[in-house]
Image (spheres, coloured by chain):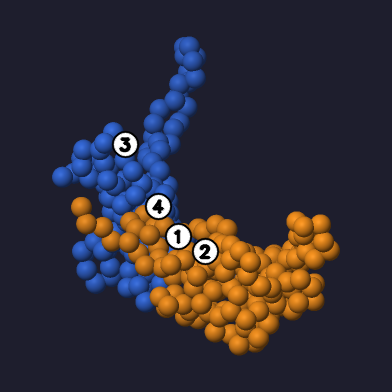
Chain colours: A blue, B orange
Amino acid sequence: MAFMPGKATTIAITTASSTTLVTVGQVVSVTPPQTEWRETEVTHLASGVVEKRATIQEVGPCSFVIERDAENVTHASILTALSTGADRTVRITYVGSTGLTRDDFAGFIKTWTPEEVSVGDVVRVGVTIQPSSGVAITSAVT
Amino acid sequence: MSIATDLRSYLLTQSALTTLSSTRMFCHKRDQGSAFPALVLVLDNEEHGHRLTAASGWAMARVTIDSLATTYVSAANIAEQVRQELSGFNGTIGTSSTLVTSVVLDNRAERFMDPIDGSDVGVFVISSDYMVQYAESVPTFTT
């Protein structure tokens, strides 16, 4: 398989009482954290082009959407994390071309954003995790 | 089974409706030569929920229910009684005990089908589109 399908991608988060990663249930979609270098311009009189240098990495938020279930313990765990703002360990696991790949980072639950509730649809909630660390991207974990 | 057959099973148990149309409720097409008035239920399209790991277990179907009669008043009365039985409904229906979580009357249209024999006896049709959300089993696989 020369591609990574979206199906079977999971996001797991530790709970308040344990360091064991627990897979979040009923996830519809995941947007992994984005990493980019901030830059500073160092152009000088002898420069032939505008010169820039990387300064520090910035990691953007990770977001995912769940089909809400009030009885789902992993959803309750997210709400607990939201109320405390404490860091949790997060792992996104993909199904890769040569095995599993994953993103590991620490972060806090930043937003809990319910979508519009309407007749004939199901209740969905968007969750955002702000990483407080860099993202460790591991390929071909077997 | 489909949600249309489950809806048909449910409607067949509603005496206020069967008083008007008897048990002439069909799926997809009316039996040739059958009497009027009658109902025809057609599943127009169906959306199914999915998550990253598996099916969600819910579906949203658009079901058109045609109320057919040789007089406009009869067709209108039947369409209205169907609305009384379905619009806003939630509950368990059908022989497979399908859990219906919502029914919304989305659209209604009227037309007249001209007779094919040159007479003046055509059929009045009132088409009502219902959006039906229901629970379905999540498939499991053996490989």
The answer to which of marks 1 and 2 sits earlier in the sequence is 1
How many angstroms separate mark 2 from mark 3 (CA)?
31 Å
Q: Is residue B139 visible?
A: yes
Please, is residue A48 above or below residue B93 in the view? above
Q: Secondary structure at mark 2?
A: strand
Crowding at dot 1, Cα within 10 Å, few <14 / some 14-19 / many 20+, comes out as some
Name the residue type under label 1.
Gly
Asked if marks 1 and 2 touch (Cβ < 8 Å), the reply is yes
The image shows residue A128 at horizontal and vertical percentages of 43, 58
Are the residues under marks 1 and 4 on the same chain?
no
> Which residue, given by chain and number where applicable, does mark 2 sit on?
B60
| Residue A2 percent location from the top left of the image | 28, 33
In this picture, is A139 found above or below A42? below
Disc number for residue A3: 3
Circle 3 — which element? Answer: loop
Q: Quadrant of residue A55?
A: top left
Residue at 21% in and 64% down: A19
| Spot occupied by residue B43 in the image (x, y as percentages of width and height) | 55, 61
The foreground one among A58 and B3 is: B3
Q: Is residue B42 visible?
A: no
- Marked residue chain, label 4: A
Task: Tell which of B12 and A54 is nearer to you.
Answer: B12
Measure the alpha-carbon separation of dots 3 and 4: 17 Å
Residue labelled with disc 1: B49
- Which residue lies under the disc numbered 4? A30
